Image: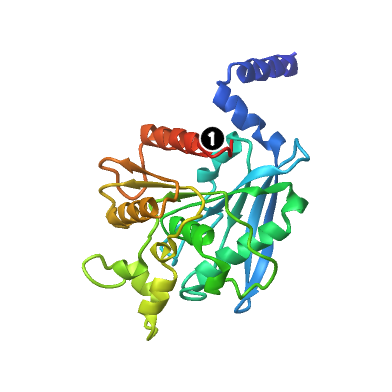
Amino acid sequence: MKATLLLLSCATAFAQLSEKATWAAEAQNHYIIKPNITYGVQNNFETKLDIYQRRDTTGPQPTIIFIHGGGWTGGSKETSVFPLFPYFEMGWNVVNVEYRLEKISPAPAAVEDCLCALRWIGVHARDYNIDATKLVVTGESAGGHLALTTGMIPMSAGLDRQCPGPELPKVAAILDWYGITDVNDILDGPNQKSYAVQWLGSMPNKEQIAKRVSPLEYVRPGLPPILMVQGDQDPTVPYSHSVRLHEALDKADVPNQLLTIPGGKHGNFTPEERVRIHKATREFLAKYHLL
């Protein structure tokens, strides 16, 4: 009798779940997680990625490539799961990428790794039901910078040579959350940031390398659409970085949008601001036929 009452109580509680709570409870039925797949080995360090693959379909799916932040010196893919939830709700596959941090290898290692991850994803797309024509790369802070470099840097720059292979797949869109666009600007001068100094270290050609890994250096016609999101009071990455990239993209006739969060700091946006951002993201993706 008690068992029957418990089952009835659980059934009633489940029936009273909100639509969002029901989706969360059932999400595990929609995705299979394939963690810690090695996509490269550099300096005796295995770089890995996690794949969240739709289990209820066999066709190729639009896929988000997510790159975590942390000033190129910290952070991990394991602590960057919550930003993936909006893409699960959209029904997309997700690839969560790690890369070599400064303590393993300084610049430009992180940029090289993310380009190698992109190539790996292109090569193995069929194995994981990934639609290689609908790859959208995104990230926050240093991850936003790496999303930009991954989607903007051409093979001619030579930063993919650590993982020779077929042509890099073309990214369909870039979603940049308050990413760095001019590394030299934060390496020295009034906008200097300790994380940039740490990433470049004391190498004698640090200015050259900083230029080589700066998205602003790769603005040209033919780039994928780019959505930039940043608070105009960001103390960690100058808001001017997004403004300058937006202006340069406009000049090159690259489709783009700058979504400014008035008074916004470095992430930590309010729930209302996040709803606004994700609504704008969906509209942006739909505009370019990715939804």
Report the residue marked by disc 1: 286
Residue 19 sits above or below residue 263 on the image: above
Give the percent coordinates (x, y) of residue 197.
34, 73
In this view, 71 is above or below 51 = below
Q: Is residue 6 above or below residue 183?
A: above
Asked if 107 appears above or below 140 in the picture, the reply is below
Quadrant of res 289 = top right
Task: Classify residue 162 as left or right of residue 230.
Answer: right
Residue 188 position in % (x across, y down): 27, 73
Q: Residue furthest left?
A: 190
**How many residues crowd mark 1 within 10 Å: few (<14), some (14–19), many (20+)?**
few
The kind of residue on which mark 1 rests is Ala
Q: Residue at x 33, y 70 (%)?
A: 184
- Pick the front one: 60 or 169: 169
Residue at image position (70%, 36%) is 30
SS assignment at label 1: helix
Front in this rendered view, residue 271 or 124: 124
Whole-percent x, y for residue 155 in the image: 57, 69
* Quadrant of the snapshot with the N terminus: top right
